[in-house]
Amino acid sequence: MSAPFILLCIALYFGGLLLIAYITSRKSDANTYFIGNKASPWYAVAFGMLSDSLSGVTYISVPGNVINTQFSYLQLVLGYLVGYIIIAKVLLPLYYKMNLLSIYTYLETRFGRNTQKTGSFFFILSRTLGAAGRLYLAAGVIQFFVFDRFETVHIPFAVSVSVIIALMLLYTYKGGIKTLVWTDTFQSFFLILGVVLSIAAIISSTDWSFGTAVSKLSHSSYSQVFFFDWHKSTFFFKQFLGGVFIAVTMTGLDQNMMQKNLSCRSLKDAQKNIYWFSIVLVIVNFFFLALGALLFLYQQEKNIPLPMNEAGKILTDRVFPNLALNYLGAFAGLVFIIGLTAATFSSADSVLTTLTTSMYIDMFEFDKKPIAESKKTFYRRFIHIAFAVLLWACILVFNAINSKAIIDTILIIAGYTYGPLLGLFSFGIILKRKVTDSIIPVICLASPVLTYGLNIWLPKLIQDYQSGNEIILLNGIITFGGLLLFSKGKGSPIIA
């Protein structure tokens, strides 16, 4: 498959996104941008959230990492189910009752403005780095397998990233959430199609029937789901409990995920959206893991060398792209590129809108200022563009550093930045105790530092101990404990 043909397919894909943006952004206003006029169908939000939660990192890394962790990732995903029930039963009723645009406005009501800005700060920090990291990884794959293969002209990485960011701006700049609900639905379709057709391409490239493929997968060493060595990061309860609190924090306490939920017509619709989304998410992740196992079984069957670095370590993030683009045929390569495009840009494009919302409402409080609507629109659009430029700059920095560890570090940062949000919201909802607003930013900044120290200390204290997804829970507990230490008043629960 030629690089120009792949580029043409990506261009047609973006043409579809721009058409959706044009249709949904007509007669748009601030209400359209922030909450989609409270008219988003729950089924569109639920389906669209799939692509938002499954980034390009997931699309590439989960299948490739099967060789190291088998199906243990499914333990984490099963924990998500419990987390989403908590979101539907506890957080969504609170957000709808308060009629929020930004969920961090709750922190102002409960504690004060400093706390609201602290919550927004952790969200902005984590989501900016996370979105830039995901885009960097996906753009790097597209650059390596597409743009670097043009023989007549050299397209620098900075130029290709600039085009990607510009295209994202085109279809998010005006319509906001109303547009994103439908573009994410469009992208979820192609993401799921990419996984399913990739599995089909592997089976068709061998002499296996569907039943043979299922049998080989189930009897392979890759298909183990449950692990009970508590020293390891794959230990069931580390993964399961980590999944519960990752879902609560990175969906329920995350403006990026909640803003779409708040655009539903009613609380009942938003809850229905969460329930169906959680079930489908488990199924889709199972397909990702099955794809990973089949990739390695195919590699063994065809005796294809795995991509490795100079030290002889397998580059797991290159396994899927390498097989799809170099060995499985033109159809599989095209399916991979479109699936990766869908997974990556759906998780990054919505960030521009939700980062803008948090900065506009939580940090600058433009929604409360007595200024003309035209000026508010100007400020909102200026912030939107500014975040696009910031994402572009972060991606170029990651490329200059040129370290695979950067991506791993970004994913770990999420555990440290969302932990304080877990502590803040859980304390505010569960207890009536008061905490001085000015001390809360100090507690929230100290918590990740203490968590990092414990993460260094525990492996030294307990031989062979490997920390995993429990970091986010530990971070939240430390934040909760700090708030409790500096609180006063009665401790009776708000929620019975």
Image (cartoon, rainbow, N blue to C red):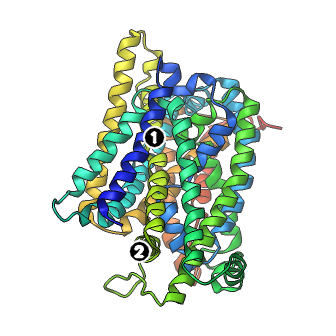
Which residue, given by chain and number where applicable, does mark 1 sit on? 16
Viewer-side residue, 106 vs 193: 193
Quick one: SS at disc 1?
helix
Q: Position of residue 429 (x, y in %)?
A: 70, 37
Q: Quadrant of residue 246?
A: bottom right
Q: Residue at x 22, y 50 (%)?
A: 159
Q: Residues within 10 Å of mark 1 (few under 14, many from 20)?
A: some
Q: Residues within 10 Å of mark 2 (few under 14, many from 20)?
A: some
Query: Disc 1 versus disc 2: distance between alpha carbons?
Result: 27 Å
Marks 1,2: beta carbons within 8 A? no
Q: Position of residue 328 (x, y in %)?
A: 47, 75
Viewer-side residue, 334 vs 255: 334
Specify the quadrant that holds the N terminus.
Answer: bottom left
Q: Position of residue 229 (x, y in %)?
A: 68, 81
Chain-order first, disc 1 or disc 2: 1
> Between tags 1 and 2, which lies in front?
1
Which residue, given by chain and number where applicable, does mark 2 sit on? 322
Q: Residue at x 53, y 20 (%)?
A: 31
Q: Position of residue 224 (x, y in %)?
A: 69, 79
Specify the quadrant that holds the C terminus.
Answer: top right
Which amino acid is tagged 1? Gly
Number of numbered tags placed on the structure image: 2
Quick one: SS at disc 2?
helix
Viewer-side residue, 103 vs 372: 372
Q: Is residue 462 left or right of residue 94?
A: left
Which amino acid is tagged 2? Asn
